[in-house]
Amino acid sequence: MSKERLKLFYTFFRVGAFTFGGGYAMVPVIQKEMVERAKLIEEKEFLDIIAVAQSLPGAVAVNTSVFVGFKLYGIPGALSALLGTVLPSMIVITILAVFYQQVQNIQSIELFFKGVRPAIVALIFMAAIKLSKNLDPTRFNIVVGTGAFIGIVFFEIHPILVIIAAATIGLIREKKEERHGAS
Amino acid sequence: MELLNIFLVFLRIGAFSFGGGYAMLPLIEQEVVRNHNWLELSEFVDIIALSQMSPGPISINAATFIGFKHVGILGGIVATTGVVAFSFFIVTVMASIILKNRESGTIEGIFRGIRPAVIGLIGAACVSLFDTSVVDLRTLGIGLLALLIIGKFKLHPIAIVMISGTLGIVLYSL
């Protein structure tokens, strides 16, 4: 592995190791590592990558790492990033599976995660705020964003349907403007 | 032969799991408990408990655990490879299409709609995570403190995880 790919692997290893609470918990970690520290991708690009990751089958963390790795160093980059993301989880689960009976009774692990979970919510919330600053507060953005939020929270619409609807609306809007621009 | 079987089952699970996370558990249960009898239902429930103790995506945790229980370490590796294989394929294909056609109006239009929607999606995830993680005054306090620290000091998320976890142990042991 080249030096750059090794760094990519290490970055995503950290992402995989500190993603508790599933999918979106990795958003703040990748944001910090790739966007703010290493400056490998731009914030706006990052938003697009999450959009793609969420729209395709599979775990959001896995999809995001494959996309970022591929963008930077092609297929080998995608492989390094993917390996980094899944390895911590594989190691920890294998150890836990072996010692499960004993681990079940360690109360401090449970308490640790009880404390971590609300902090994860705060982290994701702040990441969403940071991401939203890349979008101009146009009426279109506000309506689509709040519409997506309300659709999922209050009407329990599946996120995939929300994404398809939003993509369609964006496409219609773009084509309409293209036609206006041409005339 | 059994390894190939594990690979194919998890390949299918990975390819059909939109939305990820807990949404894919019913699909895994159908395949692993009912169709193949690789796990008892009670062992399957353990996956949820284990996933909460382990970092990483739930699908990876589940695949590693089931493969390991059924065949051993190699089983865990094969199951995990299976569950990410389709993702790897489809994401690299989509990424190369998107990166090559960034100027296209169609792709820009699609992203124009999805960008604000993703912010809404993440906001919605916050609400459901809030419901399951803020269960009393102590967890509310940790959440608010985390919010304050992130806003004021720009600490690394990993540091926040460590501080809040330690707080959890301290506050609940008092």
Image (cartoon, coloured by chain):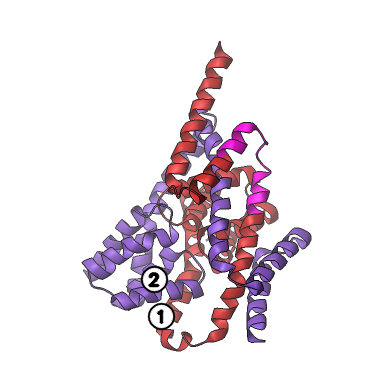
Q: Compute the Cα span from label 1 to label 2.
A: 9 Å
Query: Residue A70 placed where, x, y %?
Result: 50, 49
Picture residue at 40% right of the left edge, 73% below the top: B47
Tell me, what hue is chain B? Answer: purple
Q: Nearer the viewer, residue B70 or B135?
A: B135
Picture residue at 33% right of the left edge, 72% below the top: B67
Using residue B161 as the reference point, say whether residue A183 is left or right of it: left
Query: Residue B158 placed where, x, y %?
Result: 64, 67
The quarter of the picture where residue B131 lies is bottom right
Residue, disc 1? A97
Using residue B167 as the reference point, say whether residue A173 is left or right of it: left
The quarter of the picture where residue A114 lies is bottom right
Residue, disc 2? B64
Q: Nearer the viewer, residue B72 or A149?
A: A149
Query: Which span of residues is magenta-colored?
Result: A127-144
Using residue B13 as the reference point, say whether residue A177 is left or right of it: right
Q: Is residue A128 magenta?
A: yes
Query: Residue B23 placed where, x, y %?
Result: 40, 59
Picture residue at 67% right of the left edge, 36% below the top: A136
| Picture mark count | 2
Query: Residue B105 placed where, x, y %?
Result: 52, 27
What type is the residue that disc 1 sits on? Answer: Ala
Up/down of B50 relative to A153, above or below: below
Up/down of A41 relative to B48, above or below: above
Residue A53 at least partly seen: no
Q: Secondary structure at mark 2?
A: helix
Are the two marked residues, 1 and 2, in contact with CB atoms closer than 8 angstroms?
Answer: yes
Q: Secondary structure at mark 1?
A: helix
